Image (spheres, rainbow, N blue to C red):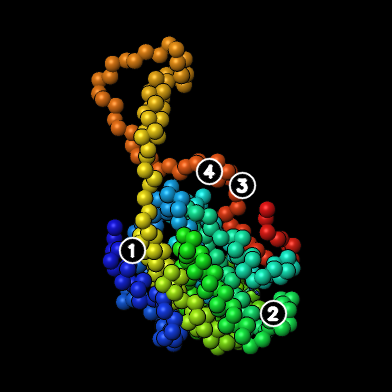
């Protein structure tokens, strides 16, 4: 595998697992880890995506661990592109993406972890949160009027509320870790200048016009408050079992490289393996082989008329095949949602599908 050691070293530079001394200003959004161009990164990205693909296959077959990838960033930092590129080699059946926008009326009627808790990945799956419960200590903190709409009992809305939320989030992530959910959190660290450049590009290029939102551009005015809120969130919730990755995001190709390496690296630390084939299963496989070999022109001979034929070569040992037990029939259904957008009462009135 190309550059596992290199990938590990790269990722380490951006990994935060003890937030006590974390300062955002120590992290340069334009950093490219010494790589000069997209071309330099391409081979490595391809190798990491392939590595990820192999690991996901085992993750799914083993059906023990679940992986939760949380993506947080300012607008135009490239969350969508990272998700698309890094996950490009994955089997969609073992991967779920959820985007969290302003909460719906139903969601506001619950505690703040409710809506994301319902979307946590099952064992064997990689779940991706495009924004998450972290918005509760980011946008909600920057815009106190949002907090006012959350219908909390007034006596609970005091100075301590952010501290309480950090504690709740940290406890939630610890609980997930205890239950076999590997939590990795990514802050795509784009600079204000690069965000401006990307917004202007959205205005200038007709095929990008649809991406531009005046509201996003307005949020820029709160840049400082957002950065302070991100810094605090990372400080308070970085942990060994739920690390943050502060990923330089001014160069999209580098962001993708770091995220792919971080996910592959984390999966590699798990004891992923295809399930052992039991003696009983081996027998079943051998019987199936005999049955299939005896089939001719699409017609199986009735069992009673079958006779053992002398073989020229001894039958090959049954290959170890990735198998999940019990077979998840329901997972084969094509209509299972892959991407679900949890919109608030948006113009199309879309809510959570089934
Ligand atoms: P993109 O702009 O790339 O399409 P996005 O994630 O920014 O992706 P938008 O529809 O632009 O999607 O924005 C979603 C908005 O929902 C963000 O401004 C985010 O801060 C907001 N949001 C998410 N969660 C909450 C929440 N719990 N409370 C209030 N606002 C939230
Ligand atoms: Mg947006």
The verdict on label 3 being within 8 Å of ligand 1 is no
Of badges 2 and 4, the one in the foreground is: 4
Give the image quarter of residue 319. Answer: top left
Residue 146 — which label?
2
Q: Which residue is depicted at the point 33% across and 62% down?
A: 43
Residue 152, quarter of picture: bottom right
The dot on residue 328 is 4
Residues at circles 3 and 2 in contact by the CB criterion of under 8 Å: no
Q: In this rendering, which labeled residue sits more in front, label 1 or label 3?
A: 3
- From the top left corner, tell me how far across and down residue 154 is, in percent: 73, 82
Does label 2 point to a residue whose CB lies under 8 Å from ligand 1?
yes
Q: Earlier in the sequence, mark 1 or mark 4?
A: 1
| Residue 179 higher or lower than 312, as above or below | below
> Which residue is rendered at x = 46% and y = 21% of the image?
298
Q: Is mark 1 within 8 Å of ligand 1?
A: no
Visible residue check, residue 46 = no
The mark found on residue 280 in the picture is none
Which x, y percent locates residue 28?
41, 83
Q: Earlier in the sequence, mark 2 or mark 4?
A: 2
Q: Which is nearer the N-term, disc 3 or disc 2?
A: 2
**Depth check, front residue: 74 or 274:** 274
The residue where tag 3 is placed is 335
CA–CA distance in space, label 1 to label 2: 42 Å
Tag 2, which secondary structure? helix
Could you say which is closer to the camera, residue 253 or residue 6? 6
- Of the two numbered discs 1 and 4 in the rendering, the one whose residue sits closer to the viewer: 4
Identify residue for label 1. 44
Q: Residue at x 74, y 62 (%)?
A: 349
Q: CA distance from mark 2 to mark 4?
A: 41 Å
Q: Secondary structure at mark 3?
A: loop
Which mark is nearer the camera, 1 or 2?
Answer: 2
């Amino acid at each position: 595998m190309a550059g596992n050691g290199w990938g590990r070293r790269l990722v380490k530079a951006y990994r935060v697992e003890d937030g006590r001394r974390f300062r955002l200003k120590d992290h340069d959004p334009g950093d490219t880890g010494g790589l000069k161009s997209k071309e330099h990164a391409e081979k490595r990205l391809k190798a990491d995506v392939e590595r990820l693909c192999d690991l996901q296959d085992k993750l799914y077959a083993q059906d023990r661990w679940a992986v939760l990838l949380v993506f947080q960033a300012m607008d135009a930092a490239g969350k969508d592109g990272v998700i698309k590129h890094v996950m490009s080699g994955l089997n969609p059946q073992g991967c779920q993406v959820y985007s969290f926008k302003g909460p719906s009326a139903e969601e506001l009627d619950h505690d703040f972890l409710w809506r994301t808790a319902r979307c946590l990945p099952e064992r064997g799956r990689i779940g991706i949160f495009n924004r998450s419960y972290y918005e509760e200590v980011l946008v909600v903190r920057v815009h106190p009027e949002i907090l006012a709409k959350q219908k909390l009992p007034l006596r609970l809305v005091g100075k301590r509320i952010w501290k309480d939320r950090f504690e709740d989030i940290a406890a939630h992530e610890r609980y997930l870790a205890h239950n076999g959910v590997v939590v990795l959190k990514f802050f795509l660290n784009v600079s204000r200048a690069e965000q401006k450049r990307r917004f202007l590009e959205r205005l200038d290029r007709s095929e990008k016009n649809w991406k531009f939102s005046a509201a996003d551009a307005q949020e820029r005015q709160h840049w400082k408050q957002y950065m302070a809120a991100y810094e605090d969130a990372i400080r308070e919730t970085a942990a060994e079992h739920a690390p943050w990755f502060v990923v330089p995001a001014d160069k999209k190709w580098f962001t993708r490289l770091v995220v792919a390496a971080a996910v592959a690296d984390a999966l590699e630390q798990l004891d992923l393996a295809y399930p052992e084939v039991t003696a009983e299963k081996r027998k079943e496989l051998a019987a199936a082989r005999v049955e299939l070999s005896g089939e001719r022109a699409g017609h199986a001979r009735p069992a009673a008329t079958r006779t053992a034929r002398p073989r020229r070569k001894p039958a090959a040992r049954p290959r170890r095949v990735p198998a999940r037990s019990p077979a998840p029939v329901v997972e084969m259904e094509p209509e299972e949602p892959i991407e679900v957008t949890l919109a608030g009462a948006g113009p199309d009135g879309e809510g959570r599908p089934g």
